[in-house]
Image: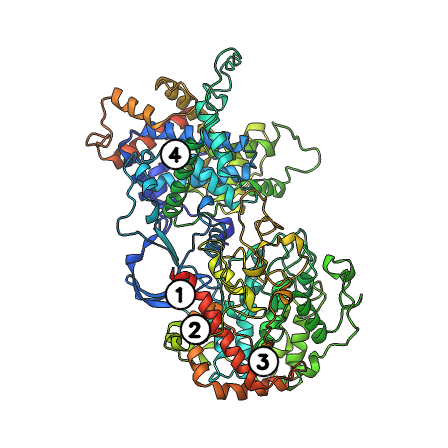
Amino acid sequence: MAHMANPLATPDQLFQRRSYGSLPIELQDTIFFATQCLTQAAGLLLQLPQSVTAQANVLLARYWLVESMMSHEFSDTSAAILYLTAKLSPHPRSPRDICNVYSYLVTRPTTALFHSPTAPPPPPHDPASPSPPYYRSESAYQAFHTRLLTLEARALHALAFDTHVALPHALAVTYLQALDFLGRGAKDGPNGLGARAVAYLNTALLSPQMLYLTSQPNALAVAAVYNAARDVGAKMPECEWWEVFDVEREELGFLVVGMRSVEGWGAVMREDLRGMGVERGMVTRGDVEAELGRRGLVVGGNGSNGVDPEEEMARRMDEKMAEMEADV
Amino acid sequence: MSILDSGKPAAAASPRSFAVAHLRPRNSFTGCSRITDYEVLGKLGEGTFGEVHRARSKKTGALVALKKIIMHNEKDGFPITALREIKLLKLLSHVNVLRLEEMAVEHPTRSSKFTSHGTAVATTDKRKKPIMYMVTPYMDHDLSGLLDNPSVHFTEPQIKCYMLQLLEGLKYLHENHILHRDMKAANLLIDNKGILQIADFGLARHYEGEVPKPGKGGGEGRRDYTSLVVTRWYRPPELLMHLKRYTTAIDMWGVGCVFGEMLVGKPILAGESDGHQLEIIFELCGTPTDENMPGWRSLPGAEALQPRPRQGNLSQRFREYGSGAVSLLRELLRLDWRSRVNAIDALKHPYFQTTPLPAKPHELPSFEESHELDRRKFHDRRAALPPAPKGGTVGRGPHDGPNASFSSDGFGSRNGVNSGRYPRGSRGPEERVPAWHRDRGLPPRPPPPSDPDHPDGYRDRGGGRPRGGGGGRQDVDTYIPSYDRDAPRRDDRRRRDDRDDRRHDWDRRRDYDDRARTSRTRSRSRSPVVRDRERDRERDRDRDRDRDPYRR
C-alpha cells in the first residue's frame, strides 16, 4: 500500500549527488548534517510535532538529492521545506513564524543544537551588550517570504509534488509490541527499548547516508528495534525475526551499521564546522565558499580533480564501511 | 543472534553492491515533466476550476487532460487544496479512481532562471511564474453531462455497471481512509470503454475513524470535521443538520443521489437552499424519528426543525424502476448515517444479482464526445440576456471573480456554486455578511483554506472570510426561477458535457423531461415551455458569468 511506502533514491541519483555542485563530499555531508539539525531545531521552536519535522527532514534530503545544495542558502532551503511540510500537516505555520524562528536560529552565536551536548554551555547573554539582531525588518521579512515561496515552488517541482512521507516511528512501536517488548513490566523511560528505537530513527534522519532515501520504513523500523534491543541487552528471538517484517538480512545489516554510525559522524561534523570557523550556529554558503577558497578549490569547478566521482564515492563508502565494522 | 558478528557478515556486501542490487525504478524523484512534452490539442473547458486542455503525450501518445492549477492565494505559496489533492491522488491507484499521471510545468517564455546564488532573479520576475498542470488520463464524459445528453439513455444493465464501478472505487477510497466529500454525478468521469472513475479530490481528506466493516454501515465517527462539504444536492441529512463527527456514510448518501439520478435522468434532490434540501429529503425518505435517525434531535442544525410527519414517497417515486432499485436506493438514502449501507455491503446487494444483470464495461455503448467550446457559436444568443442579478459580478479579486458570478442566480444552479474545484471566497450579494452571522444557507462548496494557522481544519474555519451562498438568497433575489426540475446543470464539468446536443435536441429533451417529471410528486404549475425558456436563459447567463472572469 502506497501509504506505508516511500519513493526511494535510485543509485544513479545517489552517485550523482556526490558529483554535483562541485563540493567535496565531506563538505556536502557537513552541510547536510548542519541543515538537518537546523530543521530539527526550527521544528522544536515552532512547536511542531516530530512527525512533521521528521517529514521535513526526509523531504529536504530528497530535494537535495536532485538539486544542487549551493543554489540557495541552506537555511532558506530548510525553512521552505519545513514550511511546506507544516502546511500539509495538521499544524501549519505562518511564514512569519518561520521567519522569526529561522532568524533567531541563524543569528544566535552558539546554538547548542549544533554542537556537542558535552560542550560547555554558551555563556549567558550579557544584558549590557547590544542585543543580537534576532528580529528582521519588514523588508527583510518580505525578502525572506519571497525566497520562501520561490523555494517552495522549486522544491515541489523537484519532488514532482510527491510530498508523501511514510515515517517508520509508529511501525517500530508496532513491531516492539508484536515482539512482546512493551508488555507489563517493560522498562520505560529514556533508556527503555521503545525510546531508544525512536531515538535511533530520529538520529538516522541526520545521517548523510540518507537512510530514509535508501530504505523503506519497515526496514528502518526493524533496524531501530534491532539496535535498541542490542543496546539494552534485550533478548531477541533466536530465529531470523526480521523476515517476519519483510526485511532482508543484508539490508538490515546495512541499516544497523548506518544507524549506529551517525553519532560518530555527528562528532566529526561538529569538528568540521568548528574547523571551518563557523562562529554562528548555522553554516552558510559564504562559509562554504570561504572554506573552498582555503582549500584552493574554485566554486563551480570540478572539485574531484579528474577522479571519477563514482569511483571516489564508492571507495569512500567502502572505506567508511570498513571503519564502522572495525568500530562495532 | 546478531547479524553483526555472524558468519556471514553484512560487510560482505559493500554499500555499492547493495545499491546496485536494489536498483529502483527510475520513476522516483524524476521531477515534473514539461508542458512541451505534451502536444496541446485544444481547450476542453474553462470555469471555476480553471482551464482544462486536452493534450497528447509526446512520449506515450496517450490522450490526457491538463488541468491548470489556479494560484489564488499567493501569500501562502502553493495552494494547499491543490497540494492535498495531488498528495492524495498520488497515493491512490484503482481502476475506478482518476489517476494523476504526473505534474507538468509550463515555463513562461523567459523563465525565471536561477543563478547559483541568485534568488534575486526570481524575485524580480514575479509575473512570469511557472504554471503547473495536473495531468490525468483523458476521459470522454462525466456522468452529469452524459445524463444531460438527450440522445443518451441508460439501460438498467448500464446503470448497474456504473454503480458497481462507483461502489468499487468508493470502497477502495474508504478502505484507504479517504473521505471524498464531494460525491456527485459531475465528479464521475466515464470514458468510451465504459470505465467510470471518481474524480475531483479537492475536498477529500484523510479519514481517521474506523474503515467500514461488512454489515456495520458507516460505523461511528471518531473525530470532528467541517460540515461545510459536499455539494448541496448530494449532501446527506446529517451534514445539513451540521453533524461534525461524520463518517464515510456521507459519501454513500451521494452514491444514492447519483443512483437515483441515473434512474430518473436528472438530480433527484435539487434543493434550493439548505432548508429546502432537508425538506425534500424528508419528503422522499420520511421525516426523522428516533427510530430511523437516532440522535437527530441533538444535532445542532435540528433544533429549529419541526417537520410535518411524513412517511416518505421513495417507493412510489421509484416504483417503475423495480423493487431491487428501490431497495438499494432505500439502503443508500437512509437518514441514519450509522446504519446507512457501506460500499462493501452495497456491492453485495441483490439488485446487482438479479436480471437484468450488470453489463460489462466493454459492452456499453460509446457516446460521441463533446465539450464546451463547441457552444461558442451560440454567443449571439447571449447578447439578449437579461442583466445578471444584483451583485452578480462583484468580485474581490481575480480569483473571486468566478465565485461572485453565480451566487445571485438563486440556487440550484449547478454552475459554479457547487462545482469549483478550488474553493472560492465571497460571492455576490451577501458578500459582506460574515459566515457566522448566518446559520444556514452555506454555499454548497465550502470556502478555501485561507490561512495556515488553523490546525488541521483546513476547512474547519467558521469564518474569517465572508461566505456567500444560500443564506438570505430569497431576500436578495426577487426573481427566483423555478428550475428545481432541471437547473442549468453540468457546467461544472462542461469540458465534458454535451450542451450542443442538448440544444439541438431541445424538443426531444422536453419529452424526456416530461416523462421524467411525471415521476416526481413535487412539481410547480408553470408551463413547461416557460420554464424551459427561463432555464435556458438562466443557463446562458450563468455560463457567461462563469467564464468571463477567466478571460481577463
Q: Reading the chain from its start, which is encountered first: label 3 or label 1?
A: 1
**Residue at the image position 79 percent from the left and 73 percent from the top:** B309
Q: Reading the chain from its start, which is encountered first: label 2 or label 3?
A: 2
Q: Label 4 is found on which chain of the structure?
A: B
Of residues B470 and A234, the one drawn nearer to the viewer in this rendering: B470
**Badge 2 is on which residue?**
B191
**Badge 3 is on which residue?**
B263
**Residue at the image position 69 percent from the left and 78 percent from the top:** B314
Q: Reading the chain from its start, which is encountered first: label 4 or label 1?
A: 4
Are the residues flagged by discs 4 and 3 in contact, CB closer than 8 Å? no
**A108 relative position to B328: left or right:** left
Q: Label 2 is found on which chain of the structure?
A: B
Same chain for the residues under marks 4 and 1 in the image: yes
Q: Position of residue B245 (x, y in %)?
A: 68, 55
From the viewer's perspective, is the residue at label 4 or at label 2 nearer? 2
Residue B11 is labelled as 4
Q: Where is residue A321 in the image (x, y as percent from the top left)?
A: 37, 30
From the viewer's perspective, is the residue at label 4 or at label 1 nearer? 1
In the rendered structure, which amino acid carries the disc numbered 3?
A: Leu
How far is the residue under mark 3 from the one under mark 1? 28 Å
Are the residues flagged by discs 4 and 2 in contact, CB closer than 8 Å? no
Is residue A185 depicted above or below B251 in this figure?
above
**Badge 1 is on which residue?**
B137
Same chain for the residues under marks 2 and 3 in the image: yes
Q: Reading the chain from its start, which is encountered first: label 2 or label 1?
A: 1
Are the residues flagged by discs 2 and 1 in contact, CB closer than 8 Å? yes
In the rendered structure, which amino acid carries the disc numbered 4?
A: Ala
In the rendered structure, which amino acid carries the disc numbered 1?
A: Pro
From the viewer's perspective, is the residue at label 4 or at label 3 nearer? 3
- Going by the picture, which residue comes out furthest to the left? A306
